Image (tube, grey):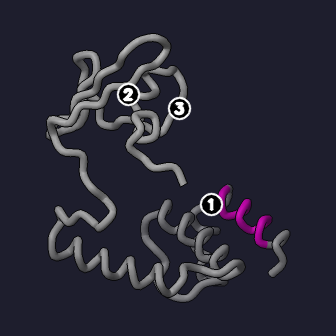
Amino acid sequence: MSQEDLDALLLRVKGGSNAQVTEWWKQFLRGPCPANNLARRYGLAWRLQAQQHGGLSDRTKRRLRELDAAFAADPEHQPSGCSPIKPGTQFVRQWDGRSHTVHVTNHGYVYAGKEYGSLSAIARKITGTRWSGPRFFGIKRQK
């Protein structure tokens, strides 16, 4: 299948009816078709692209299996390289001539007396634009 054919098919998958997507699944893929319409549509699109461009590497598949087993054994598992921010931590960021302080709680983050679910929501509140919260507060290393 050419890239142009794949692009056209993906557009049809995006706009097609659920019945059409089910038929394309049967035509192009093996295995059971998901009952959930969204899973079927996204799954078909992803697998068609993976067939064309290559899917996940063996290394990535192995790591995903390891993580799946770790989370099955312990839902609170923290993968290596993922250090949770401990409650009680405080972030201070200077922005637009003001000092902004965020407190980490057990359930999220508190900024200006209001609780937020993510640092990104707070960064957006402070700046008025979309930001990666961890990057805005300087806790995410740049590559």
Report the amino acid beneath label 2.
Ile
Q: Is residue 65 magenta?
A: no
Report the amino acid beneath label 3.
Arg
Rendered image: mark on residue 58: none
The answer for how far apart the CA atoms under marks 2 and 3 are is 10 Å
The answer to which quarter of the image holds residue 27 is bottom right
Question: Dot 2: few (<14), some (14–19), or many (≥20) neighbours within 10 Å?
Answer: many
Who comes first in sequence, dot 2 or dot 3? 2
The answer for how far apart the CA atoms under marks 1 and 3 are is 34 Å
User: Which callout, 2 or 1, points to the residue nearer the camera?
Assistant: 2
Q: Which of 129 and 45 is in front in this view?
A: 129
Q: What element carries label 1?
A: loop
Q: Does the magenta stretch include residue 12?
A: yes
> Which residue is labeled 3 in the image?
130
Number of marks in the rendered image: 3
Main secondary structure found in the magenta portion = helix
Q: Position of residue 76 (x, y in %)?
A: 17, 62
| Highlighted magenta segment, given as a residue range | 6-14
Quick check: 131 left or right of 12?
left
Q: Is mark 2 on a helix, strand or loop?
A: helix
Instruction: Quarter of the image for the N terminus: give it.
Output: bottom right
The answer to which quarter of the image holds residue 89 is top left
Who comes first in sequence, dot 1 or dot 3? 1
Look at 15% across and 40% down and name the residue there: 87
Q: Is residue 127 above or below residue 42?
A: above
Look at 65% across and 76% down and name the residue there: 48
> Which residue is labeled 2 in the image?
122
> Which residue is labeled 1 in the image?
17
Report the amino acid beneath label 1.
Ser
